């Protein structure tokens, strides 16, 4: 008989400002099961988990642990009750070692100081016990994302958790790392741990989990055995309609090399070499996909070629000019557009209106004799909102009040209509809902039809496969592989390049 360990009843969360993030959520978790929470972005998964972990206040509703109602006012309370959480964005101290991070906050002291030797011993012991390998003495900033995640899991166990919440743990992993994580989670399940697993990758959920609960628009709409539903059925429950994310792509001939990156180098402020003698080129009219585990130089390289960052050395040749020597504005004027990775930090001016955000990349075109042409502006903004299906109450409200998907569609509208020849897209669909994702994908393919040349950096390998004409893989600031036969590329193969287990210099030389 399944033993119910956790139960929530009519849990509701209204954030200050009135966002109804969870509404009357009901579900329960059994001891020793892996229970998935699935739902589109913004469905309310993280909010629900944060309430269970005591870091978001519950607006109304009840939480029961082992049949007894509990009230948590901080994560300390949750931890005391055996609940641990690994957040979507990991929360480790980069300059401390693995062992120091493990014991941080509850460390044993020698006089006033942390007993480092003891911390290392304990880390090695717990790491061995649960078969989650970490390098105790390394600094967190020097370890891989996969290892950081193991450390986060160990941290919860070190604090006595028996229920572990993992918020989208696979979003940042290579396929092989995901497989390893799953093996370890299945192991923990065997040891009697209960796992709450958040994901929107439905094949993973099918494979790993015993049961799943679907959230949609902040409501729990179904709990069922994972064995009883297909990924397609789950997707339909999440989105409310069929979504395929497969596209017809026209065959086409590509032009010459429109952009060449040559011997590019960049070192960050910690002295870590992010871009290391990087070489690649973009053909006219193609979508060039860039795969790679986060932190392998993709972001820095894109920022260099759009003028957002200065290279140490090397060049980016485009129409007889070196983009490395130019400012953002000069690069824009030369015809380079950029959808940056972080739409809140770099992509938009959050306090400014939707209108001002939209026109920012087209000011020259929208001016007459250096004076803004208000009629042209209204017409331009209206067409952006219409053609890119940006849901906004008006053009006057600040862009930050739109949903993530709509902010992203507005940024894509601005960048796709600025008249550029080369469009650099960095994680253009990260964190947007499936509907907006499908829309942005179609717009990318429209740009391809219009002979624009696009660079698409994405952590979503399915997205790269669906849209790219070629895929190059970044590893430690270099190109580790060039894959031209995209339809036949497997995620496993991409993963090998991403992890640095495969390197194909011959193809890279031919490409350069
Ligand atoms: N701190 C916050 N303040 C206000 N609204 C928030 C906050 N965090 C999340 N939200 C909103 O709550 C809703 C659910 O978000 P979230 O729980 O993060 O969803 P998910 O994890 O499923 O993507 C979204 O509309 C989001 O914008
Ligand atoms: Mg979330």
Image: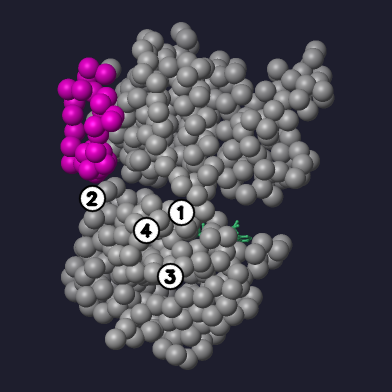
Q: Which residue is mark 1?
A: 236
Element marked by disc 4: helix
Q: Which mark is residue 176?
A: 2
Q: Which residues are magenta?
A: 482-511
Residue 169 on the magenta segment = no
Please tell me whether mark 4 or mark 1 is closer to you in this view: 1
Residue 498 on the magenta segment = yes
Question: On the rendered image, what quadrant is the N terminus found in?
Answer: bottom left
Q: Residue at x 46, y 21 (%)?
A: 448
Ligand 1's quadrant: bottom right
Query: x%, y% of residue 196?
Result: 38, 70
Instruction: State how many labels appear.
Output: 4
Q: Is residue 470 left or right of residue 258?
A: left
Task: Tell which circle, 2 or 1, labels the residue nearer the N-terminal end.
Answer: 2
For residue 311, say whether it is visible: no
Q: Which residue is mark 4?
A: 169
Outermost top residue: 320
Cα separation, mark 3 vs mark 2, equals 29 Å
């Amino acid at each position: 008989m399944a033993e119910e360990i956790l139960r929530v009843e009519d849990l509701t969360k209204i954030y200050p400002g009135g966002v109804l993030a969870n509404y009357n959520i009901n579900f329960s978790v059994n001891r020793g099961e892996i229970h998935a929470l699935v739902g589109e972005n913004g469905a309310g998964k993280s909010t629900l988990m944060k309430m269970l972990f005591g870091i978001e206040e519950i607006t109304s509703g009840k939480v029961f642990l082992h049949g007894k109602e509990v009230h948590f006012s901080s994560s300390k309370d949750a931890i005391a009750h055996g609940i641990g959480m690994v957040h979507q964005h990991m929360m480790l101290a980069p300059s401390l070692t693995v062992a120091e991070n493990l014991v941080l906050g509850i460390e044993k002291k020698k006089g006033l100081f942390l007993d480092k030797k003891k911390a290392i011993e304990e880390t090695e012991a717990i790491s061995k016990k649960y078969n989650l390998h970490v390098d105790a003495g390394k600094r967190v900033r020097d370890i891989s994302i996969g290892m950081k995640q193991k450390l986060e899991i160990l941290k919860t166990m070190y604090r006595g958790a028996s229920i572990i919440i993992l918020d989208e743990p696979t979003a940042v992993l290579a396929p092989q790392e995901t497989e390893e994580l799953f093996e370890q989670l299945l192991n923990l399940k065997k040891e009697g741990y209960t796992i709450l697993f958040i994901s929107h990758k439905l094949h993973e959920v099918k494979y790993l989990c015993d049961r799943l609960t679907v959230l949609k628009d902040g409501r729990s709409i179904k709990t069922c055995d994972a064995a009883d539903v297909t990924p397609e059925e789950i997707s339909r429950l999440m989105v409310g309609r069929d979504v395929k994310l497969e596209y017809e792509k026209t065959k086409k001939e590509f032009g010459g090399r429109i952009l060449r990156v040559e011997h590019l180098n960049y070192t960050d402020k910690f002295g870590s070499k992010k871009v290391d003698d990087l070489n690649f080129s973009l053909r006219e009219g193609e979508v060039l996909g860039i795969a790679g585990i986060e932190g392998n130089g993709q972001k820095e390289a894109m920022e260099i070629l759009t003028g957002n960052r200065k290279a140490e050395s090397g060049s980016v040749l485009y129409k007889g000019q070196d983009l490395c020597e130019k400012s953002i504005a000069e690069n824009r004027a030369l015809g380079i557009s950029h959808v940056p990775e972080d739409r809140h930090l770099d992509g938009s001016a959050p306090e400014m209106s939707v209108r001002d955000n939209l026109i920012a990349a087209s000011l020259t075109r929208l001016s007459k004799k250096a004076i803004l042409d208000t009629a042209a502006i209204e017409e331009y903004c209206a067409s952006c909102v219409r053609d890119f299906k940006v849901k906004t109450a008006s053009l006057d409200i600040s862009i930050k009040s739109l949903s993530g998907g709509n902010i992203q569609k507005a940024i894509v509208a601005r960048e796709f209509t600025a008249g550029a020849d080369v469009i650099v897209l960095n994680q253009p669909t990260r964190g947007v809902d499936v509907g907006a994702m499908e829309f942005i994908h179609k717009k990318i393919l429209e740009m391809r039809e219009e002979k624009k040349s696009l660079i698409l950096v994405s952590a979503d390998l399915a997205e790269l496969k669906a849209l790219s004409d070629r895929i190059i893989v970044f590893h430690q600031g270099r190109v580790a592989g060039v894959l031209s036969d995209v339809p036949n590329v497997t995620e496993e193969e991409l993963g090998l390049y991403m992890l640095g287990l495969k390197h194909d210099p011959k193809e890279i030389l031919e490409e350069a």
